[in-house]
Every structure is written in C-alpha cells, then in structure tokens.
C-alpha cells in the first residue's frame, strides 16, 4: 500500500477519531500510539534520510529491507503502523462473502482464523507483529515478524496487521495481551483487507 511513498514522509492521519475504537482500544492508547509512537518513527526516518540523497529516492517498502538499521527500523515502524491503523475500523462489518469463502478455504472458518490470529499473537516472544497475508498462489497465511521487521513484501501481499508491542495495549490492559488481541478481532477492517487483496 505504500509502494509510491518517498522521502520526505508525512504522517497519514488516523482514518477515524482517536476515541472511535473505544472500548476495544481507548482514546488514550490511540493518542500515544498514533501521535507519539508512530510520529517518532516518522521523524526518525526523515532524519535518517536527510543527508542521503540516494536513499531519498528509494521507496518506503524497499527501505524496510536496508542493511542500515537506522533506516530499516524506522521505515518498518512507519510502514507497519500505517498498515495497522488502516487494519482497524470502528465500523467493522466482517468479511464479505468472497472473503468469507477464501477464509473458509484456508482456515476452515472465521472463528478458526480469529483463534489462530489470537494464538499467534500470544505465542510471539518480545515485541512484534501478526500479519494476515496472501501468497502468490492466492493462499491466506498468518505470519509474525519481530521488532519493526516486515514480511517479504515482494512475495506476499499484506492484508491485515496487528501490533503486539506492549505499547499497543499496556495502558488499557497492562499484561492482558489476550484480552487486547480478542478486542482487536472486533474492530478489524475487512473492507480494507479485501481491497488490498484485489490489488
Ligand atoms: Mn506500535
């Protein structure tokens, strides 16, 4: 989704009000997450690229694979957070019939997919992300990455991403990660996932 993005990076506004996901995710958490954590990655990415004209012409997706940690980590922080905020919605309508068929084919049922997303998040050691992605063979898969790493964006199309860093839930739920993951299931933006699938 970020394939055309280049330096200088500007913040993508939250596509809903800060408090719109409450009670699943509070306004307080979303404020710190979007206005502080995400903005810090954005500012650090711009700072890391400021004196590197060559890197300024490399698209964001490619910056997430760079050897230079300062660029890679902050590019991943920007990419992942933009996808995360777009993966959530206060008007969750659930998957369309077409998406439902795909989910049934790959996971058995919507319930099994959600259980697997929650369990995968519970199994993640340290800070990281849970992804729902589509392979080139049009198969849906669940993956995890650590820190601010992205999945292989050349081979996989990300559809949804869940932030499993403690800052995503600690203010609301302290150590109750499972409660957060289950709350996220209630506000996943399936319409956005489906439009990414069509791309
Ligand atoms: Mn985060």
Image: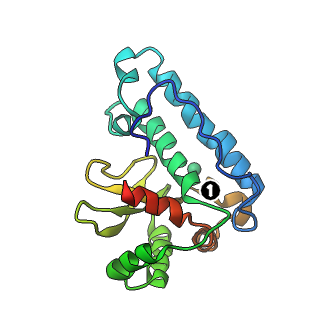
Check disc 1 and report its element: helix, strand or loop: helix
Residue 125 seen anywhere in this rendered image of the structure: no
Whether ligand 1 has any atom under 8 Å from the Cβ at mark 1 is answered as yes
Q: Residue at x 54, y 58 (%)?
A: 87
Q: Quadrant of residue 89?
A: bottom right
Give the class, few, some or many, for how many residues have Cα within 10 Å of label 1's Cα (few <14, many ≥20): many
The residue at which mark 1 appears reads as 168
141 with respect to 189 (left or right):
left
Residue 118 seen anywhere in this rendered image of the structure: yes
Work out whether 20 lies above or below 32: below
Work out whether 135 lies above or below 45: below
Whole-percent x, y for residue 25 in the image: 70, 62
Q: Residue at x 47, y 24 (%)?
A: 48
Q: Residue at x 60, y 41 (%)?
A: 38
Work out whether 158 lies above or below 92: above
Whole-percent x, y for residue 91 in the image: 66, 66
């Amino acid at each position: 989704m970020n394939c055309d993005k280049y330096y200088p990076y500007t913040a993508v506004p939250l596509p809903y009000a800060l408090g719109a996901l409450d009670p699943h995710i509070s306004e307080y958490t979303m404020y710190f997450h979007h206005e502080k954590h995400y903005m810090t990655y954005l500012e650090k990415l711009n700072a890391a690229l400021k004196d590197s004209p060559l890197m300024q012409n490399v698209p964001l997706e490619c910056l997430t694979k760079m050897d230079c940690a300062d660029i890679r980590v902050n590019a991943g922080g920007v990419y992942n957070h933009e996808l995360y905020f777009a993966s959530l919605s206060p008007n969750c309508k659930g998957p369309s019939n077409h998406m439902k068929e795909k989910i049934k084919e790959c996971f058995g049922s919507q319930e099994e997919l959600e259980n697997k997303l929650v369990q995968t998040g519970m199994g993640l050691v340290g800070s990281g992300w849970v992804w729902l992605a589509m392979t080139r063979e049009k198969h849906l898969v669940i993956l995890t990455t650590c820190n601010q790493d992205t999945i292989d964006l050349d081979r996989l199309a990300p559809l949804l991403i869940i932030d499993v860093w403690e800052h995503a839930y600690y203010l609301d739920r302290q150590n109750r990660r499972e409660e957060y993951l289950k709350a996220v299931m209630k506000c996943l933006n399936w319409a956005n996932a489906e439009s990414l699938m069509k791309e």
